[in-house]
Image: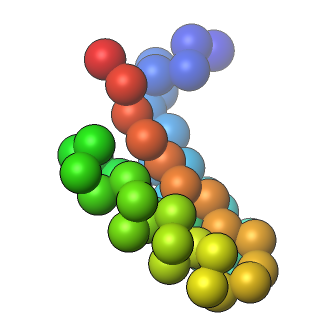
Amino acid sequence: MDIDDPPVDFVALARSMGVGGQLVEKAGEVRDAVRAALERAEPTLLELPIA
């Protein structure tokens, strides 16, 4: 299996296992996403696609 074929929704996968998840698509959103994840004080997946 390639990592992108079939496409995997990692955020949905994380949430299905009880872990918070967020897709971060813009560089300007990274800081706020990391800050929010740290404030939750529980496991959180941040998906940051790179191309």
* Up/down of 25 relative to 42, above or below: above
Any part of residue 24 in sight: yes
Please state which of residues 50 and 11 is positioned toward the viewer in this rendering. 50
Toward the top, the furthest residue is 2
Q: What is the basis of the colouring in this image?
A: rainbow
Name the quadrant containing residue 33: bottom left
Q: Position of residue 32 (x, y in %)?
A: 38, 68
Please state which of residues 29 and 44 is positioned toward the viewer in this rendering. 29
What is the tally of numbered marks visible in this picture? 0
Please state if 24 lies on the left or on the right of 5 as rendered: left
- Tell me what residue is drawn at x 29 percent, y 57 percent: 29
Please state which of residues 29 and 16 is positioned toward the viewer in this rendering. 29
Any part of residue 16 in sight: no
Name the quadrant containing residue 20: bottom right
Please state if 51 lies on the left or on the right of 43 as rendered: left
In the rendered view of the protein, which quadrant contains the C terminus? top left
Q: Position of residue 30 (x, y in %)?
A: 38, 54
In the rendered view of the protein, which quadrant contains the N terminus? top right
- Tell me what residue is drawn at x 43 percent, y 41 percent: 48
Q: Position of residue 27 (x, y in %)?
A: 28, 43
Please state if 29 lies on the left or on the right of 17 as rendered: left
